[in-house]
């Protein structure tokens, strides 16, 4: 799973100078506030609280650097102390949650940058990959996040990601599984399959929509 993710991270990573500028400005103001906070410190508990805040801010800055820079992706694993770990040793490591967080934010940035699920599919050449492969599982996580963004913002054109229709047969069936697991409305699925004006016979004849009905137990209309 990790190797697969790192390969794709190298392909998609881009530099976001505006985010770095915004971060610098934010922390300049924050530094002044913390200096004032030190003057008002009156107890050891206040010191502990400040230490925790500073630790959280350090982690936040580190995460932003990973996401918005072209830094070599193995550095992320190294900084988290995860190099060489696999299986239970990896999953039980206290920094593994940060790796998952990194993956989530990385995929979110890809969506914001307009990387379609079709592009993601093509990069991994998933038509030739097993559905049990780590690459395929990563695609499912990305496509699920992408679909959630579309569904939750379907009436907000300014926030909704670009909607891509079509795809290879295998990819569309993968999306059908995602729609079924998330119990998407029939009209929503029809729109993606360009079946908005299809009659009952046409709906039943469509292999993707038929599979959706089979997986969800929904009626045709």
Image (cartoon, grey):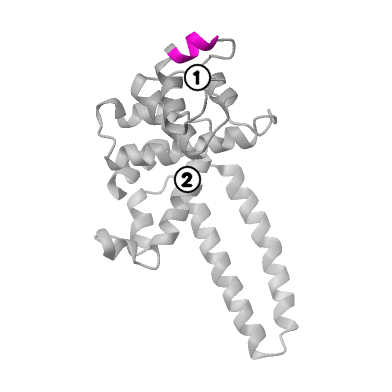
Whether residue 125 can be seen here: no
Where does the C terminus fall, quadrant-wise?
top right
Q: Is residue 105 left or right of residue 158?
A: left
Q: Is residue 99 left or right of residue 26?
A: left
**Residue 173 percent across, percent down from the top left:** 38, 26
Q: Secondary structure at mark 1?
A: loop
Residue at x 25%, y 34% (from the top left corner): 130
Determine whether 161 is above or below 60 in the image.
above
Q: Nearer the viewer, residue 196 or 155?
A: 196
Q: Quadrant of residue 166?
A: top left
Determine whether 34 is above or below 83 in the image.
below
| Magenta stretch, residue numbers | 199-204
Q: Quadrant of residue 79?
A: bottom left
**Residue 148 percent across, percent down from the top left:** 55, 38
Determine whether 205 is above or below 155 in the image.
above
Q: Nearer the viewer, residue 171 or 82?
A: 171
Please tell me whether residue 104 belongs to the stretch shown in magenta: no
Determine whether 159 is above or below 127 in the image.
below
Name the residue beneath numbered marker 1. 165
Please tell me whether residue 203 belongs to the stretch shown in magenta: yes
């Amino acid at each position: 799973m990790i190797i697969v993710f790192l390969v794709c991270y190298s392909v998609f990573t881009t530099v976001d100078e505006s985010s770095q500028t915004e971060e610098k400005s934010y922390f300049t103001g924050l530094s002044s506030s913390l200096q004032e906070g030190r003057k008002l410190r009156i107890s050891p508990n206040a010191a502990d609280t400040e230490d925790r805040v500073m630790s959280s801010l350090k982690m936040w800055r580190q995460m932003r650097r990973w996401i918005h820079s072209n830094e070599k992706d193995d550095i992320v694993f190294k900084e988290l102390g995860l190099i060489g770990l696999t299986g239970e040793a990896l999953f039980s490591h206290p920094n593994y949650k940060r790796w998952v967080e990194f993956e989530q934010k990385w995929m979110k940035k890809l969506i914001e940058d307009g990387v379609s699920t079709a592009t993601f599919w093509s990069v991994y050449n998933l038509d030739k990959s097993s559905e049990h492969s780590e690459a395929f599982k990563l695609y499912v996580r990305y496509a699920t996040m992408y679909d959630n963004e579309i569904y939750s913002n379907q009436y907000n054109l300014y926030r909704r990601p670009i909607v891509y229709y079509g795809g290879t047969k295998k990819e569309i069936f993968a999306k059908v599984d995602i729609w079924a697991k998330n119990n998407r409305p029939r009209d929503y699925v029809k729109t993606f399959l360009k079946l908005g004006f299809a009659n009952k016979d046409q709906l039943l004849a469509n292999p993707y929509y038929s599979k959706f009905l089979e997986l969800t137990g929904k009626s045709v209309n």
